[in-house]
Amino acid sequence: MTVPKQAKLVVLEKLKNLPMDAKLSIGNGQSITKNELIKHVEDLDEIGKEYIEVELFYLRSIARRHGK
């Protein structure tokens, strides 16, 4: 998956606005800290790309719901 620069920036800004102690579930009972996830997104590794894809799906579904 090729990640557009704008998509990466949007996701990073959203993550940076989470509380400092935020943890996110990444499946199979695993969790990850906000800072760990930011690093994965910045590095565009497998976890980072998957998270960007999920966030873009979420944002697009909100836009569709509101007729944009």
Image (cartoon, rainbow, N blue to C red):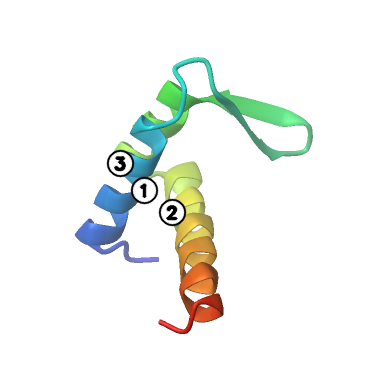
The picture quadrant where one finds residue 17 is top left
User: Which quadrant holds the C terminus?
Assistant: bottom left
Q: Residue at x 47, y 47 (%)?
A: 46
* Furthest-right residue in this view: 29
Say left or right for 16 vs 52. Answer: left
Q: Which residue is nearer to you in this view: 23 or 53?
A: 23
Position of residue 48 measured from the top left corner of the image (x, y, whole percent): 43, 44
Position of residue 45 measured from the top left corner of the image (x, y, whole percent): 40, 44
Q: Which mark is residue 51?
A: none
Q: Earlier in the sequence, mark 2 or mark 3?
A: 3
Circles 1 and 3: CB distance less than 8 Å?
yes
Q: Tell me which amino acid carries mark 2.
A: Ile
Q: Tell me which amino acid carries mark 3.
A: Glu
Q: Tell me which amino acid carries mark 1.
A: Val
- Name the secondary structure under disc 2: helix
Query: Mark 1 to mark 3: distance in Å?
Result: 5 Å
Query: Mark 2 to mark 3: distance in Å?
Result: 12 Å
Say left or right for 48 vs 3. Answer: right
Q: Which residue is mark 1?
A: 11
Q: Residue at x 53, y 58 (%)?
A: 54
Vertical side of 21 occupied by 42: above or below: below
Q: Earlier in the sequence, mark 1 or mark 2?
A: 1
Q: Which residue is nearer to you in this view: 58 or 39?
A: 58
Position of residue 44 measured from the top left corner of the image (x, y, whole percent): 34, 46
Q: Which residue is nearer to you in this view: 60 or 53?
A: 60
Q: Which residue is mark 3?
A: 13
* Furthest-left residue in this view: 5
Vertical side of 58 occupied by 31: above or below: above
- Name the secondary structure under disc 1: helix
* Furthest-bottom residue in this view: 67
The picture quadrant where one finds residue 2 is bottom left
